[in-house]
Image (cartoon, rainbow, N blue to C red):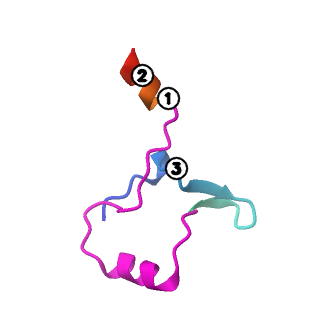
Amino acid sequence: MDIICETCAYYAYDEEFEEYVCDINLDEDEYARLLQSNYKTCPYYKNGDEYKVVRHQM
């Protein structure tokens, strides 16, 4: 799976583990489907670039 976590809105710093983690809230069934899937990219990826719309309008 090609993952671009650094630009994802769900990529957040966890102070307890002192590292960046995927902070999406999945239940156990959704997580199992994600791990067993044949996705080429993460289906939950959401661009975290707040300025994307502004740059598009310029």
Sequence-wise, which precedes: disc 3 or disc 1? 3
- Residue corresponding to mark 2: 55
Q: Which residue does the image show at 24% across and 73% down from the upper left?
A: 38
| Magenta-tinted stretch | 23-50
Give the quadrant of residue 52: top left
Q: Are marks 1 and 2 in contact (CB under 8 Å)?
A: yes
Q: Are marks 3 and 1 in contact (CB under 8 Å)?
A: no
How far is disc 1 from disc 2 in space, using C-alphas?
Answer: 6 Å
Q: Secondary structure at mark 3?
A: loop
Image mark for residue 9: 3
Amino acid carrying label 3: it is Ala
Image mark for residue 4: none
How far is disc 3 from disc 1 in space, using C-alphas?
Answer: 13 Å
Amino acid carrying label 1: it is Tyr
Residue 20 place in picture, x, y as percent: 60, 58
Image mark for residue 51: 1
Left or right, 29 with respect to 39, comes to right
How far is disc 2 from disc 3 in space, using C-alphas?
Answer: 18 Å
Amino acid carrying label 2: it is Arg
Residue 29 lies in magenta, yes or no? yes
Give the quadrant of residue 29: bottom left
Left or right, 4 with respect to 38, comes to right
Location of residue 36 with respect to 44 vertically, above or below: below
Location of residue 1 with respect to 48 vertically, above or below: below
Q: Which residue does the image show at 30% across and 65% down from the upper left?
A: 1
Sequence-wise, which precedes: disc 2 or disc 3? 3
Crowd rating for badge 3 (residues with CA inside 10 Å; few <14, some 14–19, many 20+): some
